[in-house]
């Protein structure tokens, strides 16, 4: 900022904008804050100072905030691409519905917390996919007949689920409220054994269990 030798400011037109030299005028305010990209003080020659010392005004009475051009450019780019700078996690409408469902349905029994499947619809009805699941089961059976190791892994895993109470035989199959989940084994090279996988993405009549849930159902039990 260059001081003035008179009461009137002088404006210079530059390639990047205007430069105002001199007093900013108006009433003085202690809390006035101005933003500028570069601050530089230049004093007139001594002769000029001696002649107009009584009328010399400086703008440093007010506070100035120096603005970094790089920060301004970054801010401008972030406004064009808000996902770059927005680190705050936000919930979608479905996220809120899921959280409300879990908060109102969770309960504790025998030192374990129980949660329902997060269905999108309360009165959900599903088509009867029993015949489709039986075809998948027959295919799985033929693979077990060809490979003893595969058969031993699958039967052992299912027996373990039943013994620990993670799965149990259903007494009935309500119409529209039953869905048969196909399963198969996947070989794990790292552990040198088969892993049981429940195919919750299996589709029947253009419907699947994953389509009806807020989030994907875990497709394999943890061991």
Image (cartoon, rainbow, N blue to C red):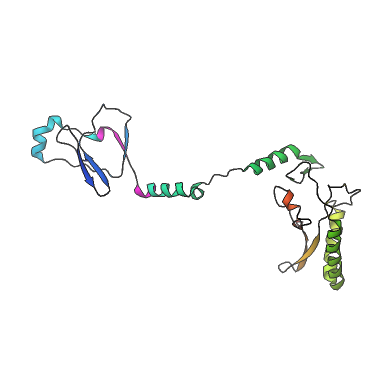
The correct choice, above or below, for 38 with respect to 143 in the image is: above
Question: Residue at horizontal 34%, vertical 44%?
Answer: 67
Tell me where the magenta segment starts and ends, as one range. Answer: 60-71
Across the whole image, how many numbered discs are drawn on residues? 0
Seen from the viewer's position, the closer of residues 40 and 11 is: 11
Seen from the viewer's position, the closer of residues 198 and 152 is: 198
Left or right of residue 116: residue 144: right
Residue furthest out toward the front? 205
What x and y, as percent, mark residue 191?
Answer: 73, 66
- Assign the C terminus to one quadrant of the image: bottom right
Seen from the viewer's position, the closer of residues 13 and 150 is: 13
Residue furthest out toward the bottom? 146
What x and y, as percent, mark residue 211?
Answer: 72, 51
The reply to whether the magenta stretch includes residue 67 is yes
Question: Residue at horizontal 25%, vertical 35%?
Answer: 60
The correct choice, above or below, for 211 with respect to 153 in the image is: above
What x and y, as percent, mark residue 81?
Answer: 48, 50
Residue furthest out toward the top? 27
Seen from the viewer's position, the closer of residues 106 and 126 is: 126
- Assign the N terminus to one quadrant of the image: top left
What x and y, as percent, mark residue 169?
Answer: 89, 52
| Residue 149: quarter of image | bottom right
Residue furthest out toward the right? 171
The reply to whether the magenta stretch includes residue 101 is no
């Amino acid at each position: 900022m260059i001081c003035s030798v008179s009461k009137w400011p002088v404006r210079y037109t530059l390639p990047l904008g205007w430069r105002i030299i001199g007093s900013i005028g108006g009433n003085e305010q202690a809390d006035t804050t101005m933003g500028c990209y570069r601050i530089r003080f230049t004093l007139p020659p001594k002769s000029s100072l001696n002649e107009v010392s009584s009328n010399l005004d400086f703008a440093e009475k007010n506070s100035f905030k120096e603005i970094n051009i790089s920060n301004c450019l970054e801010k401008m780019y972030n406004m064009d691409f808000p996902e770059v700078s927005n680190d705050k996690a936000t919930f979608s409408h479905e996220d809120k519905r899921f959280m409300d469902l879990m908060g109102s349905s969770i309960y504790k029994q025998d030192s374990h917390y129980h949660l329902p499947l997060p269905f999108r619809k309360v009165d959900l009805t599903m088509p009867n996919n029993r015949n489709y699941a039986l075809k998948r089961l027959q295919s799985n059976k033929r693979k077990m007949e060809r490979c003893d190791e595969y058969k031993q892994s699958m039967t052992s895993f299912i027996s373990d689920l039943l013994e620990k109470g993670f799965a149990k035989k259903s007494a009935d199959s309500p119409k529209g409220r039953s869905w048969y989940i196909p399963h198969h084994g996947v070989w794990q090279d790292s552990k040198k054994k088969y892993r049981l996988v429940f195919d919750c993405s299996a589709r029947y009549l253009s419907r699947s269990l994953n389509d009806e849930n807020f989030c994907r159902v875990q497709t394999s039990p943890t061991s």
